[in-house]
């Protein structure tokens, strides 16, 4: 049995009451759009079953619009995949060597970028994609608060290996902290460095040399500071993904997980008053549409 046949054989057990399989952005909102998770394990399996489901779905627009309307809108960086759902028979030059089962990732192609931008704009206007929607999808699936130390023995590991969900959790807890009666549980010893930040929303003082711990403390506080807010400079960027990375590199790791679209990124940059000298670095490290 080949992989597609395997996906087809397992599809039925994952269908909902409407006979749908949830689109990948709904099933795994904590997966970045281009994470390797779509090419291995449960993410790859789900994506394969989704494409098999779409192959079997009637190609008329009414049916496909109805399918998408039964599910949350997609993040903007899923726009091309959503377009393919709506236009299953359309072929473009940049599709010829593509592999649908990888999630419809674009290889860059030679298509005029303005055409892709026009498709995104239309999908956004029609409500098939939305700004900063993954967090809302994730939040709707939570049953209370899952504390990160239940899965990771240290904050550095949570920041390093579960960055996106740690960010979503940070936003969830920040909303709870603004309410009455906020009282977080006692943190385990391995998370002691984050206790004050979690309880008060204040992560100071930050040690930029301890990038992952600093990021974790800021996430616990619900306020991820930009490097320029901490007085750091571009020269502090080491282009490192090592465990001993400094804060600018940890911020890069977070930004790669946090921003699904240019609108969301722009709001953050405006709120943190990004200096002109950092703009080119931001554009290079966080290439969002």
Image (spheres, helix red, strand yellow):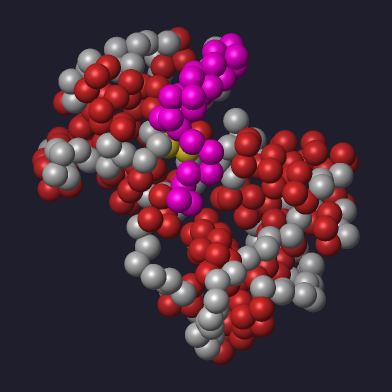
The quarter of the rendered structure image containing the N terminus is: top left
Specify the quadrant of the image occupied by residue 38: top left
Comparing 256 with 117, the one in front is: 117
- x, y (%) of residue 288? 61, 35
Q: Nearer the viewer, residue 35 or 84?
A: 84
Q: Relative to 44, is 237 above or below?
A: below
Residue 125: say if magenta: yes
Which residue is at a point 40% across and 37% down the rendered structure image?
Answer: 73
Q: Is residue 232 left or right of residue 251?
A: right
Residue 176 lies, in percent from the top left, at 53, 70
Answer yes or no: is residue 48 visible: no
Q: How many marks?
A: 0
Q: In the rendered structure, which segment of residues is drawn in magenta?
A: 112-136
Query: Which residue does the image show at 40% across and 14% down from the upper left?
Result: 96
**In the rendered image, which quarter contains the C terminus?**
top right
* Residue located 48% across and 20% down the image: 122
Question: What is the x, y in percent for residue 10?
Answer: 14, 44
Q: Magenta stretch: dominant SS?
A: helix
- Residue 91 visible? The answer is yes
User: Residue at the location (35% across, 67% down)?
Assistant: 143
Q: Is residue 209 above or below residue 17?
A: below
In this rendering, position of residue 201 left or right of residue 174: right
Q: Is 84 drawn above or below residue 16 in the view shown?
A: above
**Residue 162 located left or right of residue 232:** left
List x then y, in percent, for residue 153.
50, 79
Pick the front one: 84 or 196:
196
Q: Is residue 6 magenta?
A: no
């Amino acid at each position: 049995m080949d992989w597609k046949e395997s996906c087809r054989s397992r599809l039925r057990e994952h269908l909902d009451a409407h006979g749908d399989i949830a689109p990948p952005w709904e099933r795994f909102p904590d997966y970045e759009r281009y994470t390797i998770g779509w090419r291995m394990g449960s993410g790859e399996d789900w994506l394969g079953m989704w494409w098999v489901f779409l192959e079997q779905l009637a190609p008329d627009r009414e049916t496909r619009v109805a399918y998408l309307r039964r599910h949350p809108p997609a993040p903007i960086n899923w726009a091309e995949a959503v377009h393919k759902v709506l236009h299953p028979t359309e072929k473009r030059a940049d599709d010829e060597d593509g592999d649908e089962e990888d999630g419809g990732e674009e290889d860059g192609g030679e298509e005029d970028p303005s055409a892709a931008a026009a498709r995104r704009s239309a999908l956004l206007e029609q409500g098939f994609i939305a700004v900063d929607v993954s967090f809302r999808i994730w939040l709707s699936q939570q049953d209370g608060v899952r504390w990160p130390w239940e899965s990771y023995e240290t904050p550095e590991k949570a920041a390093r290996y579960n960055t996106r969900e740690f960010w979503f959790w940070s936003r969830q807890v920040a909303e709870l902290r603004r309410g009455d009666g906020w009282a977080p549980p006692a943190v385990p010893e391995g998370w002691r460095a984050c206790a004050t930040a979690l309880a008060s929303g204040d992560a100071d003082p930050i040690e930029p040399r301890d990038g992952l711990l600093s990021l974790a403390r800021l996430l616990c506080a619900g306020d991820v500071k930009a490097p320029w807010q901490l007085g750091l400079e571009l020269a502090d960027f080491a282009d490192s993904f090592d465990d001993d990375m400094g804060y600018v590199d940890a911020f890069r790791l977070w930004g790669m997980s946090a921003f699904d679209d240019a609108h969301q990124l722009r709001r953050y940059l405006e709120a943190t008053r990004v200096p002109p000298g950092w703009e080119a670095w931001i554009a290079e490290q966080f290439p969002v549409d």
